Amino acid sequence: MQQRLMIADDSAVICKVAKRILGGMSFQVVEASNTGEALMMCEAQLPAILIVDAGMPDALSLIHSVRQMEGGDKVRIYYCTIENDIKVLMVGKRAGADDFLIKPFDRQMLENAFGRFAAAA
């Protein structure tokens, strides 16, 4: 069974690139173009992995909300940021993110980050 992976990012280009690469790694990829849409989709069905763009309004609130849901503690949450700034990363960590992803990402970065989860599927 494919693992469900959600990308919550308001950049259509980022979603398209990530979906193509991660879909090729046998994830079932779903996209949300804003935090409200992501929250509704998570309430309907929690993904195994959630990538949240730090630049979106209410990104931290989305992470916090998912953590409060039943089973939300099992979701692997990646806080996606354009800068490798420790302050930004710590804010994401405090909100409940498990790990980080720096944009722009490429195939190699995504395979390094998610390859072990794809193999487990």
Image (cartoon, rainbow, N blue to C red):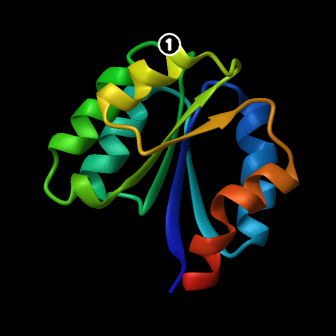
Residue at 76% x, 62% y is 111
Relative to residue 26, is residue 17 depicted above or below? above
**Residue 103 or residue 66, whichever sits in front:** 103
Report the residue that reaches farthest toward the front: 86
Q: Crowdedness of circle 1 by 10 Å Cα count: few (<14), some, many (20+)? A: few
Q: Position of residue 57 (x, y in %)?
A: 45, 12
Relative to residue 10, is residue 75 depicted above or below? below
User: Which corner quadrant of the image does residue 120 belong to?
Assistant: bottom right
Horizontally, residue 91 falls left or right of residue 34, namely left
Relative to residue 71, is residue 42 depicted above or below? above
Residue at 25% x, 31% y is 64
Tell me the element at label 1.
helix
Horizontally, residue 107 falls left or right of residue 12, namely right
Relative to residue 86, is residue 50 depicted above or below? below
Q: What residue type is labelled 1?
A: Lys
Q: Where is residue 35 in the image (x, y as percent from the top left)?
A: 42, 27
Q: Name the residue under label 1.
A: 87
Q: In which quarter of the image is the C terminus?
A: bottom right
Residue at 42% x, 63% y is 48
Using the rendered image of the protein, determine whether residue 121 is visible from the camera's viewpoint: no
Q: Position of residue 55 (x, y in %)?
A: 57, 16
Q: Position of residue 4 (x, y in %)?
A: 49, 66
Horizontally, residue 25 falls left or right of residue 62, namely right
Residue at 74% x, 54% y is 110
